[in-house]
Image (cartoon, helix red, strand yellow):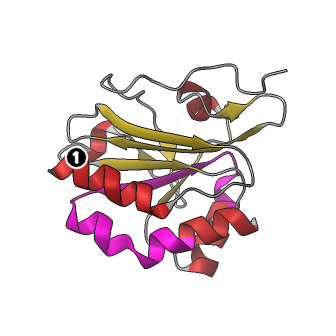
């Protein structure tokens, strides 16, 4: 049985719009971030080892995203208060957005919600300044994304 029943959005198509609260309850939308690239990173669980390792790597290399003018947002189906505690503990300086309710609605729109298990799998998406999807990668639970793929995607977008 295939756990993820939805396809991811097609490259070259407008990325699905959404409005999700950040760790302070402020709504964040892709449209509100237009004018530069946006990197959307879905993670399964706050505080899990693989997710924490991936986000610490993003945190430690955030200058590469900033140099490309890219805004990084991380989306999890965890509630906002858990994401706020995780961000404070790890010193994440990028937005963590809660897709808690309706549960996984945005993850479903991006084709990365595992219906059988109730969480988002590891999906990353790069939107250009106009909100068009230019790159994506989806990894199964437990398999971290290759950070070099972000570098390559940003370089291709800004070339």
Residue 101 in picture, x, y percent from top left:
67, 36
**Residue pictured at 70% horizontal, 44% vertical:** 140
**Left of 103 or right of it: where is 152?**
left
Q: Where 77 falls versus 25 (above or below)?
A: above
**Residue pictured at 33% horizontal, 22% vertical:** 13
Residue 37 in picture, x, y percent from top left:
26, 48
Residue 47 in picture, x, y percent from top left:
73, 67
Say if the magenta span includes residue 52. Answer: no
Residue 70 in picture, x, y percent from top left:
28, 56
**Left of 30 or right of it: where is 102?**
right
Tell me the magenta residue range.
Answer: 56-82
**Left of 63 or right of it: where is 42?**
right
**Residue pictured at 85% horizontal, 20% vertical:** 1
Q: Quadrant of residue 54?
A: bottom right
Q: Quadrant of residue 114?
A: top right
Question: SS class of the residue under badge 1?
Answer: helix
Q: Where 137 falls versus 56 (above or below)?
A: above
- Can residue 31 be seen here? The reply is yes
- Can residue 36 be seen here? The reply is no
**Left of 153 or right of it: where is 114?**
right
Residue position for label 1 = 157
Q: Residues within 10 Å of mark 1 (few under 14, many from 20)?
A: some
Residue situated in front as seen by the camera: 108 or 23: 108
Taking the view exactly as shown, the residue that stands out farthest to the left is 159
Q: Where 61 falls versus 50 (above or below)?
A: below
**Residue pictured at 47% horizontal, 63% vertical:** 147
Q: Quadrant of residue 108?
A: top right
Q: How many numbered discs?
A: 1
């Amino acid at each position: 049985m295939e756990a993820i029943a939805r396809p991811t959005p097609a490259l070259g198509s407008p990325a699905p719009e959404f409005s999700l609260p950040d760790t302070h309850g402020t709504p964040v939308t892709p449209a509100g971030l237009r004018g530069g690239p946006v990197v959307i990173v879905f993670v399964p669980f706050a505080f899990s080892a693989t997710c924490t390792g991936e986000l610490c790597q993003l945190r430690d290399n955030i200058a590469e995203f900033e140099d490309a003018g890219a805004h990084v947002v991380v989306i999890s189906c965890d509630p906002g208060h858990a994401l706020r505690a995780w961000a404070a503990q790890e010193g994440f300086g990028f937005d963590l957005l809660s897709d808690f309710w309706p549960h996984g609605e945005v993850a479903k729109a991006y084709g990365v919600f595992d219906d059988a298990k109730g969480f988002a799998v590891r999906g990353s998406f790069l939107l250009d300044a106009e909100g068009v999807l230019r790159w994506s990668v989806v990894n199964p639970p437990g398999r971290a994304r290759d950070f070099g793929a972000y570098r390559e995607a940003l370089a291709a977008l800004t070339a």
